[in-house]
Image: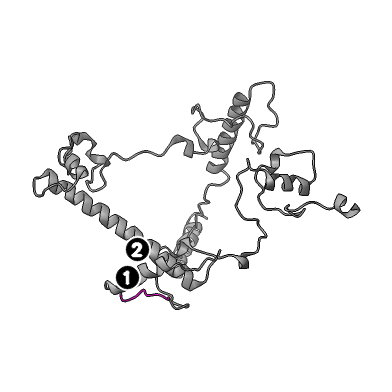
Amino acid sequence: MALDLVSIAQPHYIPGYTGHCPEYKYRIGDTYGSTTHKILLDPSVNHSERLVLSDRTADDFQIFRPPQQAIDVVNARFRNGDPVYKHPMIPGYEGFLPRLNAHFGQRYTVAATEALSEFQKLQLNQRSARNQLERVVDLQAGKGQPWNLVDRFSATAEFKLPLVVVRPECAGILRDLPMDEPKLSPASHSISPYFMEDSDPQKYIKKGFAGHVPYGFQRFGDSSKKVTNSALCDFSSNYRRRQSTEWAPVNVVKYVLIPIMLKELYIIDFYMKLIIVLFA
């Protein structure tokens, strides 16, 4: 009797279960086990017909992967002339499989069969839609007889297929009609405010910027826009000055000595001595 007072009645979720429990967040004031017990027995709560930890061996609740329908679709594709894909797909095949990247968590054979089945269904739906569109065009052109009410409405529709261009100025939006367009200049916001012209009104740093502002430590008493604009102007001026002086390339000038023949030196020395003797 004492054990019944302590234990929690079945069914309930075991404390520590981290899965989804419907409407659990709206129930307060009781333990986890008691709350889940009330939720599972409450007919107004939308929950599964079976418990999470119910015995699956006692019923016929079984899932076979891949389903037989997917196998039939893949085999029908093989019979219709596809010599590559056939169930079962051998693991290790390194070729391309359409829509295989959208399936995961299963064995290769299961994922390949389900992916091929899904791809084949999409192909059939697109082919059916294209055939229906071609039939509507033929009905509106008077090349066939309507079979049902949908065909009759399609044949007498106000807008005929194929649609004609009624606004030639919008032809540039069509992908199959090339059109020359003027080149767009790069946006002004792509230029760094550090290297904008001093007269540019956008040469400032937005309020809230927590990075370093060069030459901004000695400015205060004004708005953020004016302070940062003045600091950036000083930075740009100093940068351009140093770029033209300190960082300018060095031009090396070489002086070449022209050699003088020894014979000419002797002649010059002889005439100098002669002049000295004459005037002595």
Please give left or right for residue 220 compared with residue 249 in the image. Answer: right
In this view, the residue in front, 220 or 155, is: 155
Coordinates of residue 75 in the picture (x, y in percent): 35, 72
Seen at 32% across and 70% down, the residue is 76
Magenta stretch: dominant SS?
loop
Please give left or right for residue 258 compared with residue 182 in the image. Answer: right
> Magenta segment: does it hold 61?
no
- The kind of residue on which mark 2 rests is Gln
Q: Is residue 175 above or below residue 109?
A: above
Q: Earlier in the sequence, mark 1 or mark 2?
A: 1
What's the mark number on residue 64? Answer: none
In this view, the residue in front, 38 or 182, is: 38
Q: CA distance from mark 1 to mark 2?
A: 10 Å
What's the mark number on residue 120? Answer: 2
Coordinates of residue 220 in the picture (x, y in percent): 69, 24
Q: Residue furthest left?
A: 142
In this view, the residue in front, 115 or 195, is: 115
Q: Residue furthest right?
A: 2
| Number of other residues with Cα within 10 Å of mark 1, as a class: few under 14, some 14 to 19, many 20 or more | some
Q: Where is residue 153, by image quadrant?
A: top left
Seen at 59% across and 31% down, the residue is 206
**Residue tagged 1:** 76
Q: Are marks 1 and 2 in contact (CB under 8 Å)?
A: yes
Magenta region, residue range: 83-88
Q: Is residue 35 above or below residue 262?
A: above
What secondary structure is marked by label 1?
Answer: helix
